[in-house]
Amino acid sequence: MATAAIQQGTKWWSGGRSPFNASYGKIMMWYFLMSDAFTFGAFLISYGTIRFSQNYWVDPNHVFNSFPFAGHTNLPLAFVSLMTFILIASSVTMVLAVHEGHKMNRLGVEKYMLWTILGGICFLSCQAWEWTHLLTGQHEVLVNGQIQYWNTTVAHNPFGPEVMFNGKEVATPGPIAFGSYFFEITGFHGFHVLSGVIINIIMYLKTRMKHFELRGHYEMIEKAGLYWHFVDLVWVFVFLCFYLI
Amino acid sequence: MSSSVTSPEITFHPEHSDNTKVIWRTFWILSILTIAELSIGIGIYTIHKGENPSETLVLAFKGMVCILTLAKAYYIVSVFMHLGDELRNMIMTIIVPLCLFVWFITAFLLDGNSWRNLRNKFNRTDVNKTEQVAPAVKEKGAKD
């Protein structure tokens, strides 16, 4: 039956069946994700444009070098790699939930959905810590010949080029666009993670209430999974643009 | 035993393998790619800390990280999101519009670069001031 369908699928579509042999909901989820990819792409590209138009940009290893409970130890990239692995791991548990759904194993779906939700909450907590750290952490900046203490906000960037002052190296104010783009893009991504966690919680509850078992298929888990993997996919690019290069 | 959406409009069901080997293999591939990215990131950090940071080397490393990221994106989309299992026409309706990004990225980054060049060329007075009176006006130059 499957081979006959594929032969049919290569001819022009003339109605009466799904053009891509996929359900309406799944195709529309893909198109939504494509448009969302353009939104994120536009944000990241505008960030790139501003960055390319500056002579000086912030060194991410200098800004993101702290870890919770590690005090002032210099640990570049450590915390963000933890966040990346949390998100990859939760993507794996999501795909395992979809797999259990294909096998109609309700308890398996429930188990893996819970792990996925846990991963999402861990990621959000990490992001909350990182934002708090940036927004409250004070740094020495040389402003108009005086030392001031600045935190990183949408209006302040204490990570500018360093100059000699009273015999030691002190940072000057950096491009303010850094904070605006960082909080805008990671905030928009974090909002996607938050809505993904909420969607996953709803899916978990519906699984528990046997809605999908009665329906005969777990396709809703697949659609929620598409969204969740997309969030992971976007993080891969945010990670690249803000932390690595 | 596998289940699928039952609708007269859908005549093709992608094959779902019963074991999770592919999923775990992809997980390891993604982890290894991430670790490779992180080590390159640390490499860039050490170059920046060094005495004479080589701009070309840093640029080459950044290019490598971009390629690794695209590889990660490919694995996430084709295996985790199961796009590789869909019909070819559907894959194309997703992938072809995304090709706009090629123009999108090229045009805008070149635009940003041109802005920097124009500023550096026509704001020479600012640059000179920065060089002469050091810290106080340097801030102005860095901020705009």
Image (spheres, coloured by chain):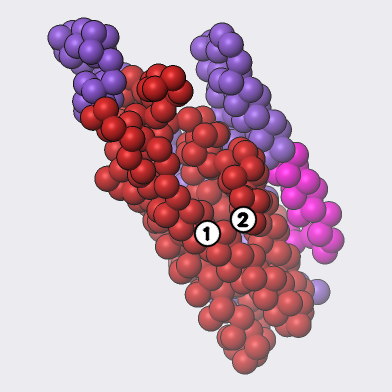
Chain colours: A red, B purple
Query: Magenta: predominant secondary structure element?
Result: helix
Q: Which residue is the site of mark 1?
A: A129
Q: Is residue A199 above or below residue A226?
A: below
Q: Quadrant of residue A159?
A: top left
Tell me whether marks 1 and 2 sit on the same chain.
Answer: yes
Number of numbered markers? 2
Q: Nearer the viewer, residue A89 or B50?
A: B50
Q: Which residues are magenta?
A: B15-32
Residue B30 among those drawn in magenta: yes
Q: Nearer the viewer, residue A125 or A206?
A: A125
Could you say which disc has been placed on residue A68 in the image?
2
- List x then y, in percent, for residue B82: 63, 54
Could you say which disc has been placed on residue A17 in the image?
none
Residues packed near mark 2 inside 10 Å, few (<14), some (14 to 19) or many (20 plus): few
Kind of element beneath mark 2: loop
- List x then y, in percent, for residue A227: 52, 62
Amino acid type, label 2: Pro
